[in-house]
Image (cartoon, helix red, strand yellow):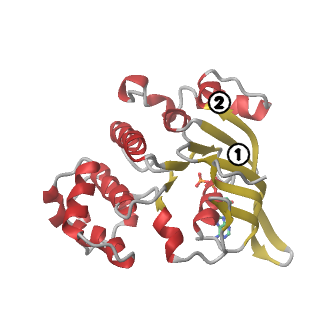
Amino acid sequence: MVTTDNIIETRGLSVTFGESTDTNRVVDDVSFHIRHGEAYGLIGESGCGKSTILRAIVGLNPDYDGEIFFQSQTVPHRRDKSFFRRMQMVFQDPYASLHPRKIVHQVLAEPLRIHGLDRHEERISDVLEAVGLGRDFRFRYPHELSGGQRQRVAIARALIIEPQVLLLDEPTSALDVSVQAEILNLLKKLRRERGLTYLLVTHDLAVVAHICERIGMMHCGKIIEELSADEVRGMRAVKDYTRDFLAASVGSRAGRIDQEMLPS
Ligand SMILES: Nc1ncnc2c1ncn2[C@@H]1O[C@H](COP(=O)(O)OP(=O)(O)OP(=O)(O)O)[C@@H](O)[C@H]1O
């Protein structure tokens, strides 16, 4: 049943790559929902299909089976502009996602132009302020920014058209650990201030536990179990696979983002 509490829902979502006898079903019959204003995390080991789900939802993988709903409406396989007005994506690598020959002002003006929004100067200044960069950053090229600053610009670009949902694909994994914490805190603040809904994909337990209220554990293309953030922190999983994943994550790179760096 699709309810109005859900902003995103998938039913029987499957994605298969390859042709004829050489096919690989990397997302296999995935059904889950995200409520308005919720932060939902998909976690799992590399290659389990997390990013493919995100890409299917945002329309970068149009060849999927099953259904995707946005605010109770079936989303057409080919997304239109109005869809992107409401849902934006932030990619893992801020080095690759920003055009090297465009200054920040141009990067931020482009979505405003595409979506026909006015007051460019004001919106650009406001969004730079919101992501913790001053107005002066407008004139910088990406190579004149640090990794964290670039990811702030990428977040600003996603937010400038005031979407309802951000899809976050490993938004901090290309950054130094100390910078990761800054960006995670920024994402938390922005969600609180703007009532955003997040779908976050990561293999990093600390990231998902700090940002998300509910977490889907993925394995071999399926969500095998859903947990609350408290259940993740308390290592209270039902499935053996999830318990092993949580146990293996403690003390790993993920564990180095400690509580002090991430005020809740
Ligand atoms: N366009 C594509 N064509 C063929 N195979 C693909 C394509 N995109 C992804 N895959 C394969 O699908 C599987 C799932 O990839 P996906 O990127 O969704 O995993 P992931 O869980 O996000 O992993 P990671 O954390 O490493 O990004 C992988 O085996 C990958 O090689």
Specify the quarter for ligand 1: bottom right
Mark 2 highlights which residue? 246
Q: Is mark 1 within 8 Å of ligand 1?
A: yes
Task: Indicate the position of residue 173 as horizontal and vertical percent values.
Answer: 46, 47
**Closer to the camera in the image, 2 or 231:** 2
238 in relation to 69, above or below: above
Mark 1 highlights which residue? 218
Disc 1: CA contacts within 10 A as few (<14), some (14-19) or many (>=20): many
> Mark 2 is on which residue type?
Leu
The total of numbered circles placed on residues is: 2
Q: Residue at x 71, y 57 (%)?
A: 10
Mark nearer the N terminus (2 vs 1): 1
Farthest residue to the top: give it. 234
Q: Residue at x 53, y 26 (%)?
A: 251
20 in relation to 23, above or below: below
**Residue 28, picture quadrant:** bottom right
Task: Indicate the position of residue 181 as horizontal and vertical percent values.
Answer: 37, 37
252 relative to 17 in the view: left or right:
left
73 relative to 250 in the view: left or right:
right
Farthest residue to the front: give it. 4
**Residue 184, picture quadrant:** top left
**Closer to the camera in the image, 255 or 42:** 42
